[in-house]
Image: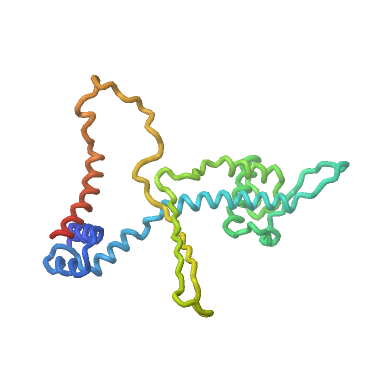
Amino acid sequence: MSAVAYRISSLLVHSGATHQDIIRLNKLGVCMCPKSTVEMQRKMGRHFDAKVLQWKSSIEDTRNCLQFLNEVIEKQKPVLEDDSMDLESVFDMREEIVKKYQSYHPNVYNKVVDSLRVNEENEHNMALCSTRQNFSEEALRYEISVLENENVPLYNLFHGIVGDNVDMEIAARIERKERGNQSLHWTHQCAVLDRASPVGDNRKQPRSDMTQLIDLLPHSQVQENLISTMAVLVSRVVTKYL
């Protein structure tokens, strides 16, 4: 079948067409069969949340690395007395030592150690041993400052996190030991695509006597968005009243 049949099938699914309607239209050669339609929908939505997961992963990686480095400093830095000489501390980053820490994770550990080695090589302009696992406090502090200054947006301009809860009380008609009243609390969170960007438009409003009619008409991008939106609405009307 052609791509047009797949497009029609997608519109029918989103417009609320029933299973029997799609079978009937498939026999007329209008759309795909229900099985092919469902398979195409799954294929189209296989990576629908890839950008959200990438945004989430970038925030988690930065925070996990910061938490791990701070815990290493907290647990390995010696406590000096008032009259003690302040010596440069050296931190042991061997995996058998730090894997007992609460914030340890193999991926976080490898990322932190690799970054520390790269920073030391750039500072000394020489290749260091790839198995080096002892680093100074200055190196760890520098890595913490780099992670804290990373431009990782905590708010995504294209997605918004939406959460909602449903509370329901189920009262038993006859309360028994094995059957009593129930209090149900469901919560659900998801990331949705924002139709409008929260960033404001700083452009000045033009004067009415200087505004041309062509500036008020929708441009090509607006027309394409209208077509994509109206296609679903029209298909819903046709499916309901045809």
Residue 6 vs residue 124, the one in the foreground: 6
Residue 170 vs residue 138, the one in the foreground: 170
The structure's colour scheme is rainbow
Residue 177 vs residue 195, the one in the foreground: 177
| Residue at the outermost right position | 83
Residue 66's spot in the image, x, y percent?
61, 49
Q: Residue at x 21, y 46 (%)?
A: 227
Count of labels shown?
Answer: 0
Residue 97's spot in the image, x, y percent?
70, 60
Q: Residue at x 29, y 23 (%)?
A: 206
| Residue at the outermost left position | 28
Residue 37's spot in the image, x, y percent?
24, 65
| Residue at the outermost top position | 209
Q: Is residue 207 above or below residue 30?
A: above
Residue 1 occupies which quadrant of the picture? bottom left
Would residue 154 appear left or right of 147 to someone viewing this image? left
Residue 145's spot in the image, x, y percent?
62, 41
Would residue 216 appear left or right of 158 to someone viewing this image? left
Q: Is residue 133 above or below residue 120?
A: below
Residue 62 vs residue 20, the one in the foreground: 20
Q: Residue at x 82, y 46 (%)?
A: 80
Q: Quadrant of the C terminus?
A: bottom left
Q: Residue at x 37, y 46 (%)?
A: 194
